[in-house]
Amino acid sequence: MKPIRIGPFSTRVDVASIVVSVIAWVVTLVIAAISLTLGDYEIPLAKVLNTLAGNGSLIMTDVVVNNRLPRVLVGMGVGAAFAISGAIFQRLARNPLVSPDLIGINAGAALAAVLMITVFGTAAGWIPAGALIGSLLTATCIYLLAYKKGIAGYRLVLVGIGITAIVGSITAYLLTLADIYTAKSASMWLAGSLAGRSWPHAILIGITLLVLVPAAVAGSRQLRLLELGDDLARTLAGRVELSRGLLIAVGVGLAGLATAAAGPIGFVALVAPQLARRLVAERVAGLLAAGAIGALLVVASDLLAREIFAPTALPVGVVTAFLGAPYLLILMARANRVGRGG
Amino acid sequence: MKTLAAAVVVLSLLTGCGGVAKAGPSATATTVKNCGIDVAVDGPPKRVFAAYQPAIEMAHALGISDRLVGTAYLDAEVLPRYAAAQKDRKYYKNLPSREELLSQDPDFVLSGFNDVFSSAGSDSSFGSRKSLSDLGVQTWIFSPLCPTADGKGDEAIDPSTVSMNNVYADLRDLGKLFNVADRAETVIADQQKRIAAVEAKVASAPKPTVAILRPGLEGGGLTVSGGPDFGTVLIRQAGGVNAFADLTSKRNVKISVEEFIKRDPDYILISGCCDATLTETQVQPDVQKILANPAYANLKAVKNKHVVPWLFAHHSAGVRGANSTELIAKLIHPDLVR
Amino acid sequence: MTRSWGGRAAGLLVAGGVLLAVVLLSLVAGNQWFGPHDVYVAAADFTGSDTDRVIRYLRFPRTAVGLLAGAALGLAGAVMQGITRNPLADPGILGVNAGAALAVVVAIGLLGVQSLTGYVWFAMGGALIATVVVYLVGSVGRGGATPVKLALAGAALSALLGSVTSAITLLDLSTLNEFRFWVVGSLTLATGSIVTQALPFIAVGIILALTLGRSLNQLALGEDLAATLGTRIGLVRVLAALSVMLLAGTATAMAGPIAFVGLAVPHVARALVGADYRWILPWSLVLAPIVLLLADVVGRLVARPDELQVGIITALIGAPLFIALVRRRKLAEL
């Protein structure tokens, strides 16, 4: 991450966040490797490696290279994307509870996806595109409705809650129209799932990260500036609104594309930046450290989701919710006590 | 761990064998079109995976029971004449994952419904038909349920394909592919004869309306079989009319309770589903619910006790066609068909 | 509208008349339209015809549920807005409905509870726990229970409870099948017996809530001032929580989680009769069923031969109002 040079502590922050990121990525890769060897089609590690090297049979190549590998890559990618998006939103709103889950962006993506699955019966390949359009439309709606001589964090949140309610109720209605099996696969999607994710999804999220993460990191300078408070920032530059808007766009893009690829995997955007912040022992989380923790969370949760009730696999979002929920409650109480809740 | 490793070795051997069997063109290479996709085999498939009741029963009807390496998701008990053949087959209560499917090393997947290949990101999807044929696994969807494009599901059924003739066409094509053409013709002839017999008896009789109703949460709306459902065909053959044939948006259509009362069908079939041991007896409680609901008390079907337990399996397209036609005819024309 | 005692009382009478008209509309409108005479026949001179049965066994219960659930949600919303001094309070926004919903799913899906009297206790328990958690989490720290903190805590808790609910429903197809029809919020789930089972709970909740008017007025002046005026704040909070639990919990058990009625109606009442809770409460009681029943009638007519569930309609009407509220006021006023 680009060091943010404010005062004499900048170097320490940098080192800590790099160390945390590296450790998180190493653990993520180990879990990913384990994930590659596990599944209904049992393949030992040696064969997996052999297959990855291009020497596997047709079916093993399909299982390892075309199914498990993209699945785990999508898991890492969306984990990082959700977490970085969450870090951006939490910083912007100066509230640790603000995440794309809660302010309606994911709900828009979910509505679009459920619409495509249940009403149009769209082939799987097109769902990401629809989900992306859904999240962008919702985000635009929220932004426009919350805009009133500038964007206040609290208004963004409350408008998001309102939009979530409308969009969520339409989604629920669509589920009642569908066949129960279609409703189930739509519900799986709604919970956030890596099942059946393949290379197009992995490539989608890869490109997303390549394009948007540098933008997010570059924007984090201004972000830091914004965190000094609107009054101060306003005196420094008139571009506060512009850079806020751009950062929101980057955050929405990350969350929207991640949701497009894997559904709205809950609580990652909320929890990962907080965990990263605590591990780095800084007031704000470095984006890259948050991303690393996010990737770790999703990949580890997916492994759990596949193994707990095996052979029945839960969607990964259910596990992240179980892990994230208690943390969220503690966080809420704590954040409010120290006065960051409102 | 040792057994695990052993299993893997065995599996990889099997994989190898599959490869050998497919190597080189054979005298019996056959290509048939199914739902717009070319299904090509070099010889009769030897390792067949049958998903859903209609596919499982059709495999037994064609006499290829011993080639089934796996069967999945029965909606009810199999027909008595297939019970013995089904008993020894590997059975999955829920649809297996693609990996599990592949681990059985099938060379052919026969599916009674279209959703196993609609890959809308679920753990119980086998993946699109193309992705399977890339691995040398040929696939088949029952023609009356052909979606308009690979990977699509129920909402994309062309209603004109929903007919017994398409079941026969499937039987013929599968007979060709599996080199059991004679057996297929026997099955077709039997079905045609029995259905024709029923149709002859009920030809001039008045046609009562029949509704096929899925049980579910009371008051939450009702789900009935609409026009594209195979039940429409079966009811017509039995000398009746599907009371909801005009609702053609989907196979299963949701309607309000008031709409159901307005239509006042002569017969109500309560279509129970989805367990390998399910019989009509287990659907009886849902029948009682309808009979006991005062809102329905004035319905013709309720007053005449024409609310009967039924099975989802009965109105799926497949080799149950003749059997189900006879069952419905006995019900709605008891004086003509015995 | 006049703010005099007589004016408000007369207005309330007029609103009561409108409610009666809407009740009649709810009985005659739908898939088939009937006349007022048909309603009379179904009620007093039952012949057993389809018309009689549709009115008596389908439209009577759904109208009764609309009346009860509407009154309950409107009143619960008004009490919540008063006790939290928060114009954004609503059983849906603050996670109370989500708590009741999860509890009902647990009761139906995991414990096999079937009857409303069985799971109404779960619904109320879930509602109570959610109310307390949201209030506790939202009121810790600087500034007490500010609107934003409460709304956020409610949204967060709803998200959390929703995930648990989806985990339970995803593991069992038949629970999912029942749940998806219940969760949209609909007046058609109820039968006559459910109405009679729910009636006592709602009645107690209504009586409790209506006694709170004076105390809520004093609370509106601030807790310190209210205390010096003789309000026992602790007791008022307990009574308020109890009434919200009874009202929102039973309404959710009857009709599923219906959002925004509790939010919108007290605002309309406030606009009509001013900030006096002694009037806001009874007005909410009368206005909310009008809104809910009208929404239900619209839902019956727009999607034939199916119906649009009432919860969808209220969300489509209520959420824009919520957003308008958020836009209109400054944070300090919220």
Image (cartoon, rainbow, N blue to C red):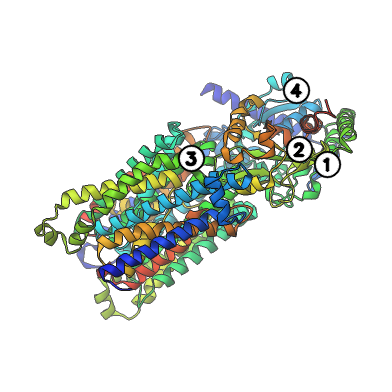
Return the residue at label 2: B317
Please state which amino acid type lies under the numbered disc 1.
Answer: Asn
Q: Chain of mark 1?
A: B
In percent of the image, x 44 and y 39: which residue is there?
A: C105
- Considering the numbered disc 3 on the image, is that residue within a helix, a strand or a loop? helix
Whichever of labels 4 and 2 marks the residue nearer the N terminus, that label is: 4
Image coordinates of residue B270 in percent, x first then y, are: 66, 35
Task: Give the quadrant of residue C227.
Answer: bottom left
- Whether residue C39 is situated above or below residue C46 in the rendered picture: below
Per the rendering, the mark at residue B166 is 1
Name the residue beneath numbered marker 3. C169
Q: Earlier in the sequence, mark 1 or mark 2?
A: 1
**Tags 4 and 3 on a common chain:** no
Label 4 – label 2 distance at C-alpha: 17 Å
Q: Chain of mark 2?
A: B
- At label 1, counting other C-alpha atoms closer than 10 Å, the crowd grade (few under 14, some 14-19, many 20 or more) is some
Q: Are marks 4 and 2 on the same chain?
A: yes
Q: Secondary structure at mark 4?
A: helix
Residues at circles 1 and 2 in contact by the CB criterion of under 8 Å: yes
